[in-house]
Amino acid sequence: TNLTGSPVCGENVTNMSHAYENCTKLTGSAVCGNNVTNMYNTYTNCYNLTGPAACGPNVNIMYHTYYNCRNLTGSPVCGDKVTDMYRTYENCTKLTGPAACGNNVKYMYYTYANCRNLTGSPVCGPNVTGMNWTYLNCTNLTGSPVCGPNVVDMSSAYENCTNLTGSAVCGNNVTSMYNTYRGCTNLTGPVICGPNVSSANWAYAYCTNLRGNAYFYSNNTRNIGNCFYGKNNSRRLNIYAHIGSKTLTELRSGTAAYSVLGKDIDWTVSGNNRYNTAYNIYIYAVENVAATRAANGD
């Protein structure tokens, strides 16, 4: 912890795991040699390290690499061989520029959590499976959300990304949307809940600019509590779900614990449909959600 000066890395070094962990007095820029493969916890808690980040061409592990490097500046980097970005840049509050994610990355848990000055559009590589808390509290991130084709968990992926615009996305393999877009106040419709989603609790809570249409493709979304909590009642929201599905039952339940608005409300019944004009929310039972979306032009 009393090491001072700038970090160094010899050309023959292959493993930098824990090399400078908790060296809080280190200054200067991070380094990474061309032969390094492992950057596990390399610069964790190096509070006084300044930018930019470094990642050699052969690195495959970036687990916790720059965790809590709150004075790191410049843009994040990620090599083409990296597979693990678990908490790589978490709490790097001075990082600017666009996010980075290599084509071989599988894990993006907390990767950019609390990187409040990160700008540009979010990214997600084609092999990512976990986006849990990936961009949590990235309040200056702009552009539209993304979700790779292999993502399974989107829990809190974009929570409190208040400057994200465009439409929400959800991949075909996603099972959890817990808190995914909570607090994304500038996100607009349409809303998407993929075919394999089982949990959408708080998924779009406090998304006050949501409007238009919401499509629930899954027949078995059983946890929908507070999904649209805090919606702007001046904006109409039309929700479509498969007729006879468990999802539809949960969506239109006025007294169940999983009420979509986080409160018990009275529904006006119109055939298989439900609506409440005070909250400007309409739930439609349809034979084919995808065909309905196409017909609506979304």
Image (cartoon, rainbow, N blue to C red):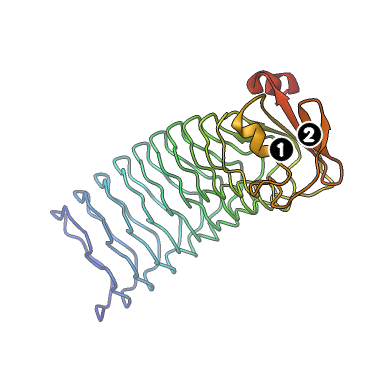
User: Circle 1 is placed at which residue position?
Assistant: 252
Q: Amino acid at mark 1?
A: Arg
- In the displayed image of the protein, which residue is found farthest to the front? 255
Which of the labelled discs sits on residue 274, or is there none? Answer: 2
- In the displayed image of the protein, which residue is found farthest to the left? 12
Q: Secondary structure at mark 2?
A: strand
Q: Residue at x 61, y 41 (%)?
A: 144
Q: Amino acid at mark 2?
A: Arg
Q: In this view of the protein, which residue sits in the foreground, 290 or 109?
A: 290
Query: Answer yes or no: do the residues labelled 2 and 1 have beta carbons within 8 Å?
Result: yes
Q: Secondary structure at mark 1?
A: loop
75 in relation to 285, above or below: below
Quadrant placement of the C terminus: top right
Q: Quadrant of residue 48?
A: bottom left
Q: Position of residue 229 (x, y in %)?
A: 70, 51
Q: Position of residue 102 (x, y in %)?
A: 38, 41
- In the displayed image of the protein, which residue is found farthest to the bottom? 2
> Looking at the image, how many numbered discs can be counted on the residues?
2
